[in-house]
Image: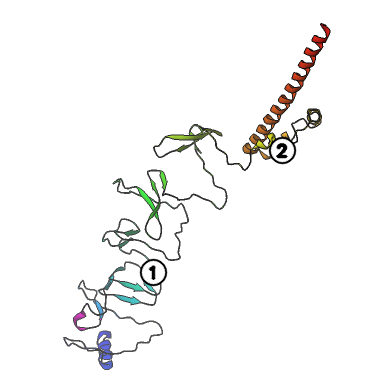
Amino acid sequence: MNMRTLSVAILMAMGCYSHQTHAQSYDVPINGGRGVIIRANHDNSNHYEPISFQVGQNGNLDHYKLQLTKTAAHFSVPVYMQQPLHLNNNAALTAHNATFGGVARFNGNLLGNRIGLGIDAPLEKLHVKNANIRLDNGQYQSWGPMILHADVDNSGDDIFSFRNSTDQEMANLTDGTMTLSFNSTLQASGMLKLRAGSSDTANDIVSFRNGANEEMARLHDGVLSLDQVRLNVTTFPDYVFAKEYELMPIQEVASYIEKNKRLPNMPSEAEVVKEGMNVGEVNIKLVEKVEELTLYIIQLQKQLDQQQKAIESLKKTSNK
């Protein structure tokens, strides 16, 4: 008895083999310590000889149906696979609403070594057409540079759009220009660097422009050029002109300058060189010194006026 006859005899004994037009239903436990092989096309002919598992009459699409052929596994209706699915070599997979509860592994030449979702002839390793890719609590990773390439078909729609949970655009990157939506914020947890002209020092210019694309200010080679600077301050030295302000006597000012080589209440050269110059603070102190100088001039003018009166009085006395 050859192997085929023996196999048929075993199946008939188990009640699993039938030449009837309509196959019967059996529950057949299969346990194999070294695996179970169910083989179609034993004679290796070119005939289409699938192994088909189905529920319902004639594989009605309202029921589950799984069909295995020499090179493909076809799921004609929704299928839920809780255990890992592993396809390798030249296996191809086409599925309709297939759900994999375990791990789906695709090795070898799957669909021409490419996976297409919504497209029959994928152009890349993973090609998704007219659909979205979503990750829940996941991340995109790359061992090398991560390249986001818009407008690969050169149709002019080279736009990267960043959106919030309500699908409103927060920012977009178009043709090298980043545009933030109204009231958006650019911030960094640490140091925020704007680096211009990293490879060409002649173009290391940071330009600040308004809505009409008119330049409001520019930063070039460490020099900031703009029309005006407005600083927020909490005080201004009008207090110098208050009656209760104590103006240092000019002799004490002279002694302080001789000893410290700077004006009173002004930072030293060492402090400014080490920590930098606080433009707002220094300007307030400069105004303070100008106002004090004005008071000194007023005092001097009063003394001159008094001296002039004394001189005039002496002239009148001497002429008598």
What crowding class fits label 2: few (fewer than 14 Cα within 10 Å), some (14-19), or many (20 or more)?
A: few
Tell me which colouring the rendered structure shows. Answer: rainbow
Q: Which residue is mark 2?
A: 271
Q: Is residue 36 visible?
A: yes
Q: Residue furthest bottom?
A: 13
Which quadrant does the N terminus fall into? bottom left
Q: Residue furthest top?
A: 319
Span colored in magenta: 54-61
Q: List x then y, in percent, for residue 63.
A: 24, 80
Residue drawn at point x = 23 percent, y = 79 percent: 62
Q: Nearer the viewer, residue 220 or 243?
A: 243
Is residue 114 highlighted in magenta? no
Under tag 2, what secondary structure? helix
Q: 72 above or below 297? A: below
Under tag 1, what secondary structure? strand
Q: List x then y, in percent, for residue 78.
A: 29, 75
Q: Is residue 42 visible?
A: no
> Relative to 315, is 134 on the left or the right?
left
Q: 147 above or below 264? A: below
User: Hey, what amino acid is under mark 1?
Assistant: Arg
Measured Cα–Cα span from mark 1 to mark 2: 66 Å
Among the 4 quarters of the image, the one containing residue 247: top right
Among the 4 quarters of the image, the one containing residue 12: bottom left
Residue drawn at point x = 45 percent, y = 61 percent: 139
Mark 1 or mark 2, earlier in chain: 1
Q: List x then y, in percent, for residue 173.
A: 40, 47
Residue drawn at point x = 64 percent, y = 34 percent: 283
- Foreground label between 1 and 2: 2
Q: Nearer the viewer, residue 67 or 97?
A: 97
Q: Nearer the viewer, residue 36 or 29?
A: 29
Q: Which residue is mark 1?
A: 105
